Amino acid sequence: MSDKKHIREKFFPHIWCPGCGHGTILNTLVRTTADMGLDQNNVVTVSGIGCSARISGYLDYHTLHTLHGRALAFATGVKMTSPGLTVIVPMGDGDALAIGGNHFIHACRRNINITAFVMNNRIYGMTGGQYSPLSGQGISATTAPYKSIDREFDVVKIASGAGATFVARTTTYHVQEMAKLMKKAIEHKGFSVLEILTQCPTYFGRKNKMGEAPDMMLWFKDNTAAIGSRQLEENPALIPRGIFVEEQLPEYAEAYMETIARAKAKRG
Ligand SMILES: Cc1ncc(C[n+]2csc(CCOP(=O)(O)OP(=O)(O)O)c2C)c(N)n1
């Protein structure tokens, strides 16, 4: 069910290009938080800089629009001082894994109860289509006119390897799955990472001759498959979607409170 009260209409029209997948993510997030019955006064979104990061401005929660790559550091501060708040960090692939890569792996390692959405359009959208650590080899970008030679990071493998206790992947084609995974990620107690493959028709699509937004979404349909599906078994080259990690480990803010209690008890 849609809920307009979660949107700051005064900031519309939004900045996104026609066909940008970030709008689908905003729409799904608003519906999910409304369906979950979350009190908007109890939700904080923290974002850096980028087309993806603009999502915070459009949400009528408590929102922090911070520095490129540093959203997780700010979010950690918010969560440590107010552990009762639901903290969501929407990030671009550059924001999360280029300039913000070090913050990302350490947030995973600490298992602080924050939800990170990596909105992966495989390019720097806001600044004009430079390639990102998620672009991959053979990709054209404004900074790779003769095609990129860098291999891409795998968000799921990085997050899992660094210790995130909830790791999942979906796409803007699979909106019902996205809503389900957003809900699970937000409900999970610990650091959750949801990678969302999203289309940037203006830069990634145009430069790589991937067609219009619907063609790029169909690419997600044709090139991904749910974990455990026959499709994936028959064609392991497909990009797997679904939940990769879901485990319960001590949460960082709680462990920190316990440390304070131990220190107080010792001092008498
Ligand atoms: C410290 C710093 N370095 C660089 C920039 C310029 N900058 C702004 S957004 C951005 C990249 C955006 O790409 P991404 O995070 O993938 O998000 P998208 O716009 O594609 O959603 C860059 C390099 C900045 N604002 N601050």
Image (cartoon, helix red, strand yellow):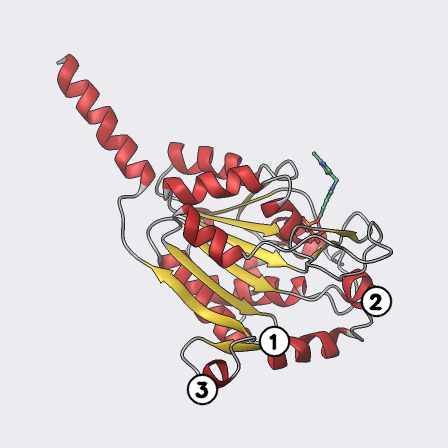
Q: Is mark 3 within 8 Å of ligand 1?
A: no
The foreground one among 232 and 36 is: 232
Which numbered mark, 1 or 2, is in the foreground of this view? 2
Q: Is residue 57 left or right of residue 74?
A: right
The foreground one among 134 and 104 is: 134
* Residue at 63% in and 68% down: 24
Give coordinates of residue 63: x percent, y percent. Answer: 56, 44
* Residue at 53% in and 56% down: 155
Which numbered mark, 3 or 2, is in the foreground of this view? 3
Mark found first going from the N terminus, 1 or 3:
1
Give neighbour class at mark 3: few <14, some 14-19, many 20+ (Cα, 10 Å): few
Give neighbour class at mark 1: few <14, some 14-19, many 20+ (Cα, 10 Å): many
Q: Is residue 229 left or right of residue 128?
A: left
The answer for how far apart the CA atoms under marks 1 and 2 are is 19 Å
Name the amino acid type tagged 3: Arg
The answer for how far apart the CA atoms under marks 1 and 3 are is 19 Å
Q: Is residue 21 left or right of residue 166?
A: right
The foreground one among 142 and 76 is: 142
Badge 1 vs badge 2, beta-carbon distance below 8 Å: no
Badge 3 vs badge 2, beta-carbon distance below 8 Å: no
Give neighbour class at mark 2: few <14, some 14-19, many 20+ (Cα, 10 Å): some
As displayed, is residue 25 above or below residue 65? below
Name the quarter showing ligand 1.
top right
Q: Residue furthest front?
A: 149
User: Which residue position is annotated with label 3?
Assistant: 230
Q: Secondary structure at mark 1?
A: loop
- As drawn, the label of residue 173 is 1
Name the amino acid type tagged 1: Tyr
The answer for how far apart the CA atoms under marks 3 and 2 are is 33 Å
User: Which residue position is annotated with label 2?
Assistant: 206
Residue 37 can be seen in this image: no
